[in-house]
């Protein structure tokens, strides 16, 4: 069974790379989807004339993030251990490790609202690429 509910998504992302800190705010419309017992949050980020489809698969122990577009990412966040992932760019595929430092996911499928508080690091070839913080709220 599939159920889809329109939601409003507010997102703040903070990135630290090479000693530089950037912060981005998004205020987007999206969908909260229940499909085969799993829960998804889907929306599109609009930035600098580019639209990037984003999907979170919500869970309390794990969180999956998929971003499509010029650069495709598919991250799995869990506190237990780092996870391997690939970052697809126009130049090829880069292998990376995702280390989750904070993962707090709360959502209420009945009232269709929730939040994500996430902090993680990306490394490639044992070199730190960056540290990232994501704070997201959604509600119908």
Image: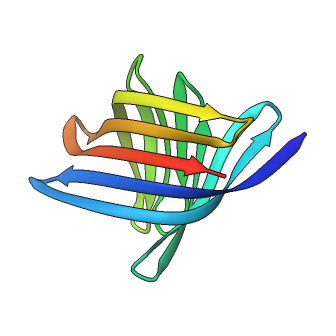
Residue 44 higher or lower than 115, as above or below: below
User: Is 76 left or right of 59, judged from the image as shown?
Assistant: left
How far across and how far down the image is residue 14, in percent?
Answer: 27, 52
Q: Image quadrant of residue 84?
A: top left
Residue 5 higher or lower than 96, as above or below: below
| Residue closest to the far left | 19
Q: Which of 136 and 139 is in front in this view?
A: 139
| Residue closest to the far bottom | 49
User: Is 74 left or right of 97, judged from the image as shown?
Assistant: right
Q: Quadrant of the N terminus?
A: top right
Report the label total. 0
How far across and how far down the image is residue 105, in percent?
Answer: 50, 31
Residue lying at 43% horizontally and 64% vertically, measured from the top left = 26
Residue lying at 42% horizontally and 16% vertically, measured from the top left = 80
User: Is 22 left or right of 2, judged from the image as shown?
Assistant: left
Residue lying at 38% horizontally and 37% vertically, measured from the top left = 118
How far across and how far down the image is residue 37, in percent?
Answer: 79, 30
Residue lying at 53% horizontally and 27% vertically, measured from the top left = 62
User: Is 16 left or right of 19, judged from the image as shown?
Assistant: right
Q: Which of 97 and 5 is in front in this view?
A: 5
| Residue closest to the far right | 1
Residue 71 higher or lower than 117, as above or below: below
How far across and how far down the image is residue 63, in percent?
Answer: 53, 34
């Amino acid at each position: 069974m599939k159920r889809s509910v329109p939601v409003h998504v507010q997102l703040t992302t903070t990135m630290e790379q090479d000693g530089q800190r950037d912060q981005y705010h998004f205020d987007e419309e999206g969908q909260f989807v229940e499909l085969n017992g799993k829960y998804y949050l889907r929306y599109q980020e609009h930035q600098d004339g580019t639209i990037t489809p984003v999907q979170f698969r919500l869970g309390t122990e794990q969180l999956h993030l998929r971003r499509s577009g010029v650069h495709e990412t598919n991250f799995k966040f869990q506190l237990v251990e780092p996870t391997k992932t690939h970052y697809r760019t126009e130049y090829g595929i880069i292998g990376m490790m995702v280390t989750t430092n904070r993962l707090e996911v709360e959502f209420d499928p009945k009232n269709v609202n929730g939040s994500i508080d996430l902090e993680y690091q990306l490394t490639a070839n044992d070199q730190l690429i960056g540290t990232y913080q994501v704070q997201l709220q959604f509600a119908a």
